[in-house]
Image (cartoon, rainbow, N blue to C red):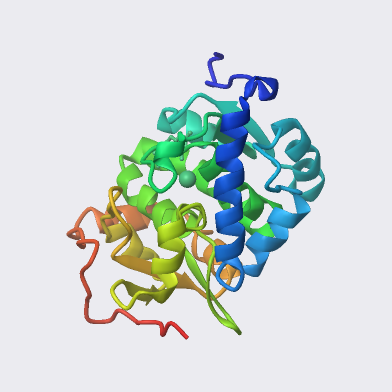
Amino acid sequence: MDGDFTIVQDWDGYTAEQHGVWRTLFHRQAETLVGRAAPEFLAGLSALSVTADGIPDFRRLNDVLARATNWRIVAVPGLVPDAIFFEHLANRRFPSTCFIRTPAQLDYIQEPDVFHDIFGHVPMLVNPVFADYIQAYGAGGLKALGLGSLHHLARLYWYTVEFGLVRTREGLRIYGSGIVSSHAESLYALDSARPHRLAFDLMRIMRTAYRIDDVQETYFVIDGYDQLFDATRPDFTPYYATLKTQSDIAPGALLRGDVAIARG
Ligand code: HBI
Ligand code: FE
């Protein structure tokens, strides 16, 4: 392992059973996501030729990504320290885990595996605006670390990159990687009457705690990726100063001023 935590994927080392887990997960999600995933996600998936065949070879994905948005996947062993993670993103390198969940973990796994990282995250990196947004998040992460405000910024990543919904002419669609890589949450996030679906609000998001052990109680809906990029363009330093004076909001709380977005 290097100082930047990168390793080699060792694509030839995957077993038939490991490729089989990818196939099972892929088939199930490919079906579920028609009419549910954002068009940009589905376009990215198809541009990358990520298919049911088996765990993709990062070298092949990197040929496509380099041409599309000049991003690159680097292999890492698991969660890496925040500063390392942000340093990679700020330089248009997406750190992806290599291991795949076991057949017993098909429905739920807490740490990111290669299905979450590649199937979930990489398709959106083909989109130019989203690709720039993630790079800006990496640069912002390094700055937030220095300002002691990482917990606030991390919520922005959580409620957009991981669990974001987008409004389209055809209705709400999923672009968040944590949702698209989870069968149960792909259904729940759009169909259940239980969670709140609120209009994107940067400060509201950065005040909102989140759960890592179950489906989300609140999703935030953007009108498009430009909204995301524009809202996060300013220097966050004054935002962090304000946030330090404000209390956190519980994951399932509803406040006066929240704008609910209809499902249909
Ligand atoms: N490392 N491999 C990996 N993947 C992540 O998503 C990740 C990480 N390290 C830190 C991290 N995420 C988060 O702390 C930040 O998004 C806030
Ligand atoms: Fe993720």
Foreground pick, 45 / 100: 100
Foreground pick, 176 / 249: 176
Q: Is residue 163 above or below residue 104?
A: below
Q: Position of residue 139 (x, y in %)?
A: 53, 42
Tell me which residue sits at (20%, 69%) in the image.
253
Q: Is residue 158 above or below residue 262?
A: above
Q: Is residue 219 above or below residue 206?
A: below
Q: Position of residue 260 (x, y in %)?
A: 35, 82
Q: Where is residue 247 in the image (x, y as percent from the top left)?
A: 17, 59
Residue 121 visible in the snapshot: no
Foreground pick, 58 / 69: 58
Tell me which residue sits at (45%, 42%) in the image.
141
Residue 119 visible in the snapshot: yes
Tell me which residue sits at (49%, 36%) in the image.
113
Q: Is residue 66 left or right of residue 224?
A: right
Q: Where is residue 153 in the image (x, y as percent from the top left)?
A: 38, 50
Position of the N terminus by quadrant:
top right
Q: In this view, does 194 lie to the left or right of 227?
A: left
Q: In this view, does 23 lie above or below 204?
A: above
Tell me which residue sits at (45%, 30%) in the image.
83
Q: In this view, does 7 lie to the left or right of 146?
A: right
